[in-house]
Image (cartoon, rainbow, N blue to C red):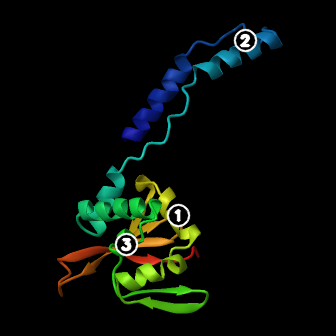
Amino acid sequence: MKTTMAALAALWLAACTPANPDSAAGTKDEATADHAVDAAAEPAPLPSVDDPLAVNQAIDDVLGDHVRYEAVIRQLQQAVTANDRAAVAALIGYPFSTVRDGQSLTVADADAFVREYDRIMTPAIAEAIKRQKYSELMVNYKGVKFGSGEAWVNGICKDDACKDVDVRVVALQPAP
């Protein structure tokens, strides 16, 4: 009903808008000038804003407390940007498994991760993490996805009911 009323109001307003009887008689220069004025009157597109509200709500709804996830996500981006291997290693869930060059690679702890860092954190993965805008993260039951899936952050259950989770980086992989 509201949609019908809105449509009728729009049609009524359009019908009541006075026509410009001289528009057909105008010259090409006048039409071009009118178009230039119209284009100048259009507002410039707003710059992209990294608004975290929707992502935070999605994390709250699907995974749990967004504050814990956001902290790990921001720390990961800062550590990768600074090439701080130990800081990245501190954010990983262990044992950590991935595939490199067609071979399975399992890393038992932070020390092993630091030793394998260049093999795990390829330039493409690092770039995806650094460029990711928080507001454009994808959230689902698998966690929070960076880029095309180069990195994932999720909660690792610490109890049987999975009420207590440890938020960690759970995947670093080449884009599919």
Image quarter in which the C terminus is found: bottom right
**Residue closer to the observer: 57 or 89:** 89
Q: Which quadrant of the structure image shows residue 18?
A: top right
Q: Residues within 10 Å of mark 2 (few under 14, many from 20)?
A: few
Q: Which quadrant of the structure image shows residue 165?
A: bottom left
Q: Label 1, on which residue?
A: 128
Q: How far across and how far down the image is residue 34, in percent?
A: 69, 14
In primary-sequence order, the first of circles 3 and 2 is 2
**Residue closer to the observer: 135 or 98:** 98
Q: How far across and how far down the image is residue 77, in percent?
A: 41, 61
Residue 155 — which label? none
Q: Label 2, on which residue?
A: 23
Q: Label 3, on which residue?
A: 86
Residue placed furthest toward the right: 28
* Callout 2 amino acid: Ser
Q: Residues within 10 Å of mark 1 (few under 14, many from 20)?
A: some
